[in-house]
Amino acid sequence: MAQQSSPLDESMSGLVNTLALYDDAWRKNKRDSDRWEKLEIVSSDGNDETLTQDVYLLRQPENFLVPTSVVFFIGGAALGQYPHIAYSAMLTKLSNSVGCAVLAAPYATGLNHFEIAKETGELFRKGLRKCECDLGWKEELPLYTVAHSLGCKLSLINIAATGISEDLSGIGLISYNNFGFAQSVGMVRSFIQSIQSNGVKEGPGSDAMMDTLFGFVEQFTQGIGLEFEPAPEIMDRLVSTKVTNMNEKIRLFCFSDDGLDCSKQLLDCIAVKNENMKSLPSVSGLEGTHLSPVYLNLDLEGIYGLSDEAKQIAGQVVGVQAASFGSEDEVNALVREIASWMTGKEPSQGPPWTSSKENVLKGRY
């Protein structure tokens, strides 16, 4: 089903187009040694029409004959459309650490998160079956889901709707976000500003133009009452009633300087159905921000075969011609914590919102 477009799509389109340029370069210059590949999932849409969808596969390292486990990954808004580009550093390091394979489901932004959750869930299911048939993966491989930001919301919706939690060995939620529509516009602005702060700006008027654009979108959104499905309060209710009997499988990963993280609110919702506080999900506290899972080297000049016109357009979109975005040290710390969780260890440090030494050591809310 086609997703309804919105003003937020317009705000994100520049970032998505830039990631698309890198995706195009990746496809044209893909090497045999590159462990990322795009799988085509062919199915029927119910009207005798053939539907082709893509899911990205990161194979296990060469020193593993078969993967030790499979991670289903969903990224955040905009970034999640090209997970093999935006999250490649984090996922490749994780795969190298624990020997897992990764299936990453791309998705376009839209208002109906129920529908996006259903589509990404189906991609995982079909992608896993394809790998079992084509690559000889065993059905008993441990399965994990790891998600970032909006991807966490989509994962929880899919889990609540399908009961797939029974088949999962773990549910990893990085910087869970359950913002409303208007708040999400500001989140996109923060991300683009972060990219610009790490690069060379295209012109003195770029900041003012961006502020004008996002200010208009926020006012327009509030004026007509656009909202996601489910809205934040409905999602809270869904968590309280449906995300139960799986708390021991859930690990939240939260950063010290993250004003976009709704993880504490998520725990409060889960606690409604849990009288015993010890049964709540564990929390790993880390240094960093909402975008710490993302590490990118944005070098438009380095894209082989990209026309000068395309480079100029991309540079105008994000306001830079070259930038190294993110912290590799923060990515490495996150990967170590995820790998530790996947191998059964407790959080190395508890949630950033508590100063209790006992809670910090136990990693429990």
Image (spheres, helix red, strand yellow):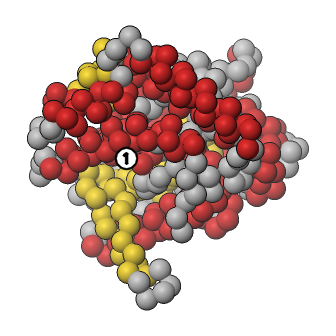
Name the secondary structure under disc 1.
loop
Q: Is residue 95 left or right of residue 155?
A: left
Q: Residue at x 29, y 27 (%)?
A: 315
Q: Residue at x 38, y 67 (%)?
A: 53
Q: Residue at x 47, y 52 (%)?
A: 108
Quadrant into which the N terminus falls: bottom right
Q: Residue at x 46, y 16 (%)?
A: 207
Other-residue count near label 1 (Cα within 10 Å), few / some / many at <14 / 14–19 / ≥20:
many
Residue matched to label 1:
82
In the rendered image, residue 147, in percent from the top left (x then y), is placed at 52, 45
Residue furthest to the bottom in view is 48
Q: Is residue 160 in sight in this rendering?
A: yes
In the rendered image, residue 84, in percent from the top left (x then y), is placed at 33, 46
Q: Amino acid at mark 1?
A: Tyr
In the rendered image, residue 314, in percent from the top left (x then y), is placed at 30, 33
Quadrant into which the C terminus falls: top right
Indicate whether 77 appears above or below 58.
Answer: above
Q: Is residue 1 left or right of residue 250?
A: left
Quarter of the image where one finds residue 269: top right
Q: Is residue 207 left or right of residue 261?
A: left
